[in-house]
Amino acid sequence: MNHLVLADTVKQVVNLNDILNALVYTGLGVMVFGAAFLIMIMVMPFSVRKEIEEDQNTALGIIMGSVVIGLALIVAAAVHGG
């Protein structure tokens, strides 16, 4: 009898539809984020990898990090519906 109460509590707390929605939106968010990042790299007139790794261009690293954070915030807001 005690197991039935626990199972009902778990069903109330964890809704499988909500978990599925979260997984789908997470996948979509990662794909949009990746596509935007690739577009950003393709638009640059120089090699981002060379500038950051070989030339130690700190300013470009900071800009790229800022863009990544901005994209992540936009995707998170879109997924959350906020």
Image (cartoon, rainbow, N blue to C red):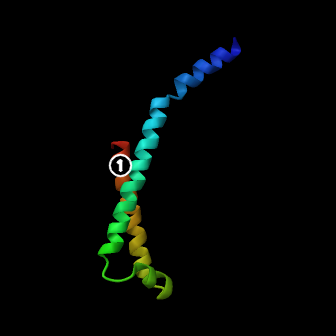
Q: Which residue is mark 1?
A: 77
Determine which quarter of the picture holds residue 10: top right
Residue in the picture at 44% in, 84% down? 50
Q: Give coordinates of residue 6: x percent, y percent.
A: 64, 20
Looking at the rendered image, the quarter that the C terminus falls into is: top left
Amino acid at pointer 1: Ala
The correct choice, above or below, for 61 with respect to 3 in the image is below
From the viewer's perspective, is 36 left or right of 51? Answer: left
Residue located 46% across and 42% down the image:
23
Q: Position of residue 46 (x, y in %)?
A: 35, 83
The N terminus: image quadrant: top right
Label 1's element?
A: helix
The residue positioned 37% from the left and 45% from the top of the image is: 79
Asked whether, in this view, residue 70 is left or right of residue 17, the answer is left
Q: Residue furthest top?
A: 1
Residue, x 47% and y 88% (percent of image)? Answer: 55
Residue 7 visible: yes
Comparing 73 with 33, the one in front is 33
View extreme (right): residue: 2
Task: Kindly indicate the quadrant of the structure image that contains residue 30.
Answer: bottom left
